[in-house]
Amino acid sequence: MDEPTAPPDPSAKPPAATGTVYRHRLATRIWHWINAIAIFIMIGSGIGILNAHPRLYWGQYGANFDHAWLDLRPYGNILRSGWLTIPAGYNLAISRRWHLLFALVLAFGLLVFMIASLINRHFQRDLRVRAREIGPRYLWADLLAHLRFDFHNPDDPAAYNTLQKLAYVGAIFVLIPLMIFTGLAMSPGMDAAWPWLIELFGGRQSARSIHFIAASGIVLFVIVHLTLVVLAGPIEEIWSMITGRWTLPTAPPEPPPAAHAEPEAAE
């Protein structure tokens, strides 16, 4: 007779998932790389434009003798560094041309990406933030996992973690749209067509200040994003954003069971 099969151990962990998953769809990958180029050029050309008057105000007007809430003139040597601005030398006209050209790339790229992400359900499937995920205990646990360099849920390693979702939602739905609409508000042509836009932001100088704050948020997002890519494994992360396929992380081997403290008694 066959020996009876032992019942499954309910405390046993399921085997770790292995192989690859299709994580990034084509629309996401194309938008990622176009956006990376556009943001890089817009930051450099934006700094070139800021150098023309490195002071920020609130309200409709702001000039040399008005009170500025932020004065960047003490950092002029850094802001005028050739490796930081586009073009390398100070040229306000060329900086504006670069900035406006890639502002169009950024705006229409975001529009197409949003439409595609609604169609392929990328937003609903990957970026939807559930109510339980923004609770203090859940966020604290996610933060501790990041500090341990544990970026993936072992039960669903391809899923986005909560902090990752919040960062992407903030960049896609808040920071980039703010940069686009405040940029439009500062355009004299758009003021003539849509005078309500400048009023929405409380004046031209307020729109300029919000534009700067949103751009600073994008710079912070890029720094954190690149840091986490390096910590998570840059080759695999970059390759997945090219091919769409991502190799699941290998779980560390289980430690062997502890030996008995005393040998069994001889029969």
Image: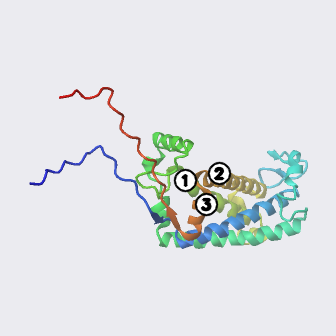
| Closer mark to the observer between disc 1 and disc 3 | 3
The spot of residue 87 in percent (x, y) is 86, 65
The spot of residue 179 in percent (x, y) is 69, 61
Q: Earlier in the sequence, mark 2 or mark 3?
A: 2
**Foreground residue among 52 and 154:** 154
Element under disc 2: helix
Label ID, residue 235: 3
**Foreground residue among 195 and 73:** 73
| Above or below 123: residue 61 | above
The quadrant in which the C terminus is found is top left
Q: Residue under circle 2? A: 227
What amino acid type should be assigned to the residue bearing mark 1?
Answer: Gln
- Check contact, mark 2 vs mark 1: CB within 8 A: no
**Foreground residue among 148 and 123:** 148
Q: For marks 2 and 3, give the CA distance.
A: 13 Å
In which image quadrant can residue 197 be found?
bottom right
Q: Residue under circle 1? A: 164
Element under disc 3: helix
| Closer mark to the observer between disc 2 and disc 1 | 2
Task: Report the residue at 50% width, 40% height from top.
Answer: 140
What amino acid type should be assigned to the residue bearing mark 3?
Answer: Ile
